[in-house]
Image (cartoon, rainbow, N blue to C red):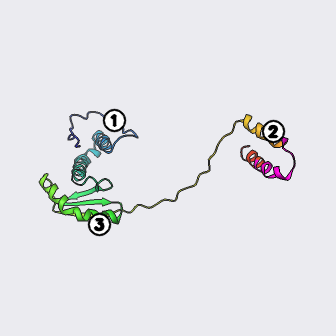
Amino acid sequence: MSRPPFSFASQQRFQPARASTKPANRVTAATDFLRTHDKMATLLPAVMRLAALQEECSAVLPALFDACSVMRFDGGQLTIGVPNAALAAKLKQQLPKLQESLLQRGWQVNAIRIKVQVRKIGEKTIRQKEIEMPNKALSAFEELRNSLDKSPGNQALTEALNNLLKRHR
């Protein structure tokens, strides 16, 4: 499934990207943003060229190129960013096919370079769930605690109710 080529005439005013937009829509929103600023408008041809090249590469190698990105295209050398070495090895096997297909589609690609961009894995913070209990529920738990017999069998339940009441007050 190919997308229609981008047309400057079809995009007349800036529309911010929504959270649920697809990558193609983000490219359009970025180009709209670049077009609205004079100094940033000089980047527009480069952005359009990289976006078009990204689409072409995705069309040639759809399964592999989902996680990859075109980083640079200068002087006939294409630089592709990949998230890990395993994907880089798979992509390296497909480089002749990719280069030949891009040449047939009109791109002057003399060499393709793969750059592994390992992302730093951040520590996951463990957040405790903060559940707010209504006062009616807290008073019901307090009433339950007070109504329990002082027997050894109820001691664990009484402690649990005490902890719950301390935490929520």
Left or right: 137, with 9 as reference point: right
Residue assigned mark 2 = 143
What's the mark number on residue 89?
Answer: 3
**Among numbered discs 2 and 3, the one appearing first in the sequence:** 3
Left or right: 112, with 140 as reference point: left
Left or right: 107, with 130 as reference point: left
Q: Which residue is drawn at 81% across and 43% down?
A: 145
Indicate whether residue 156 is drawn in magenta: yes
Identity of the amino acid at label 1? Gln
Q: Which residue is drawn at 28% across and 55% down?
A: 65
Identity of the amino acid at label 2? Glu
Discs 2, 3 touching: Cβ within 8 Å = no
Disc 2 packing (10 Å; few <14; some 14–19; many ≥20): few
Indicate whether residue 35 is drawn in magenta: no
Left or right: 15, with 111 as reference point: right
Expressed as whole percent of the image width and height from the top left, the position of residue 152 reads: 85, 53
Q: Can residue 76 be seen at all in this image of the molecule?
A: no
Residue lying furthest front: 153
Residue assigned mark 1 = 15
Q: Can residue 161 be seen at all in this image of the molecule?
A: yes
How much space separates mark 2 and mark 3, taking CA atoms?
66 Å
Above/below status of 135 relative to 163: above
Residue lying furthest right: 150
Identity of the amino acid at label 3? Ala
Expressed as whole percent of the image width and height from the top left, the position of residue 127 reads: 59, 51
Give the mark toward the camera: 1 or 3: 3
Q: What stretch is highlighted in magenta?
A: 147-160
Element type at marker 1?
A: loop
Q: Nearer the viewer, residue 49 or 5?
A: 5
Discs 2, 1 touching: Cβ within 8 Å = no
Disc 3 packing (10 Å; few <14; some 14–19; many ≥20): few
